[in-house]
Image: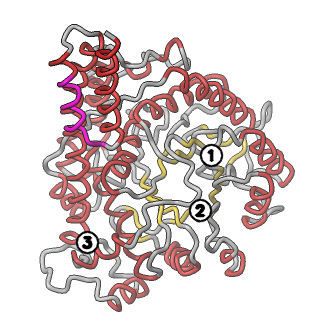
Amino acid sequence: MRKRAKKILRLFDDAVEAEKRYEFQNAKQYYRKVVLLHPNSPEADIARERIEDMDSLSNEKRIYRRIDRNAKRVLTEIGIDISSSPILMEILMGADAIDMDNESSLFIPLREDYLESCLDNVPTDMAEDPGENAFGTGATPPFLLRPGRDDLHPASREEFERIVQTASEFTDSLGIFSVPVATDKTMSDFECARLMETHFPDLKMTHTRNMSDEEAAYFRYRDDWLDGTSLITAMTFMPNMVEPFIRSVKAGNNLLLLDLTIAGSTGPISPEALLTQIHAQVLFMMVLAQTLNPGVVCVHGGIPDVLGVGGDLCYSDPAQPIINSAMARLNLWVTGFPSAQSGGSTSIINNIAAAVEESELSRNTLREYGVHILRHAMGALGSLNYFSLEKFIEDCERERSARRIWLQTKHDFLLPLYLPEDKHVVRGIREIAEKGGARYADHTLTNVGSFMRWQAKLCAVSEERLYFPDLNDTINRDKSRLKRVPEEDSVTQLQDTFLKS
């Protein structure tokens, strides 16, 4: 009996280890052995469900591979619109990176071999990598929310110092400490960064675009710093970011390459097409970075955002954490690039208790499916427009408790995300580019409601699995949030929003 139990456990351990390597078909074989050799064991009950999940996870990984391939197709077949930037054109022309033989692209296409050679140069590890599910601050909200006051302004020096000192008390909860809030003229961006460095020893993020050349160079090859920068969005470049981007790359700073494309606004509305466009835009920034400074560290900061039913950016939408988990899995499972995602925030502003609760629910959803470095999770509210020290403290304390419980109750199984497929991604992205925006594309109207149907699928599956974690009793996660899937009339309302636009 004891030998049989050990054999079952060994098979289970082998299956879980294969899952951790994202080798889902190998894991499936181990689970099948459990069922065949020990059909009446309690382990076999779980193994039968895991066999089905291994196929779902394999299919999901297949979609991520297709996203990676299609993102490269976007860069080589459609291109990025940089023709009006002499500096960027000169960089790519000088490197012989442009496919001059491509007569069907809309914009500036890259040579496939050049694209692959640049991506091969991107490091796939970080010296100060905080690991998976590393939650922290970010987004630099422009306003500090002050309890009992209506004045909305950036933080003063004294207020910023108080925030940083508070962060030093939660180093066990913060995986990354990004600039938490904008400051007034009493404090420069460089001074903010140096103060953060004084109190927080682990991974930090700043943005050097407003710093002097000497100040920006301070972060050169600093393993504990990321320089958050961006260049490409909506298939074109941002003119005001060209010089800061190039300077950061040449300085040798570790780069967090940010793309905050919004579904149905600045990008496609289907989840797969949205991830594909964002991935393509981040890859393009990586190509430029490696062209200017081969081997420079590039963290994939593709952060997909979603619109609520009202048509505005909505961090309260339950789709926000699941689409960001999917973006993380693309990199964790396929590309190997270090990545930063977004979540754990809320659209709520004036109700701190409700904002804390909603943020915790979002973080726990992200934790269930897994991310890498997560920004915006602590202290932010109002869809990243506000920062609250009161909420920050409560977020960190809740996260401290949640992590303690999670370590005691977590399982090692990977949960399928059931990412919905879109077989017309490249064609849809081309159509959106040709028509000047997602709101005017047939692809958009065809895929309205895809996020809502995705949420419904996840809700249904969560009720069926024996091993699916019931966090109601652990981390205060109310599954009714995921069940809060809009009815068909909400899909119609969303369609009307695009049609009226």
Task: Report how far apart the C-alphas of labels 2 and 3 lie in the structure.
Answer: 28 Å
Label 3 vs label 1, nearer the camera:
1
Residue 451 colored in magenta in the image: no
The residue that appears at 74% across and 33% down in the rendered structure is 390
Q: Which SS type dominates the magenta stretch?
A: helix
Up-down: is 186 above or below 391?
A: below
Please say whether residue 493 is visible from this viewpoint: no
Label 2 vs label 3, nearer the camera:
2
Task: Report how far apart the C-alphas of labels 2 and 1 lie in the structure.
Answer: 13 Å
Q: Which residue, given by chain and number where applicable, does mark 2 sit on?
A: 226
Q: Residues within 10 Å of mark 2 (few under 14, many from 20)?
A: many
Which quadrant is the N terminus positioned in? Answer: top left
Label 1 is placed on what type of residue? Thr
Q: Which disc number belongs to residue 79?
A: 3
The residue that appears at 72% across and 64% down in the rendered structure is 189
Residue 83 point in image, percent of width and height: 33, 81
Task: Report how far apart the C-alphas of labels 3 and 1 lie in the structure.
Answer: 33 Å
Residue 31 colored in magenta in the image: yes
Q: Earlier in the sequence, mark 2 or mark 3?
A: 3
Please say whether residue 415 is visible from this viewpoint: yes
Residue 397 point in image, percent of width and height: 69, 29
Q: Mark 1: which secondary structure? A: loop
Pointers 2 and 3 in contact (C-beta within 8 Å): no
Residue 430 point in image, percent of width and height: 19, 62
The residue that appears at 40% across and 34% down in the rendered structure is 369
The residue that appears at 34% across and 88% down in the rendered structure is 95
Query: For this rendering, which residue is in front, 204 or 11?
Result: 11
Up-down: is 378 above or below 485?
A: below
Q: Is residue 452 left or right of residue 395?
A: left
Up-down: is 87 above or below 183?
A: below
Q: Which residues are magenta?
A: 22-33
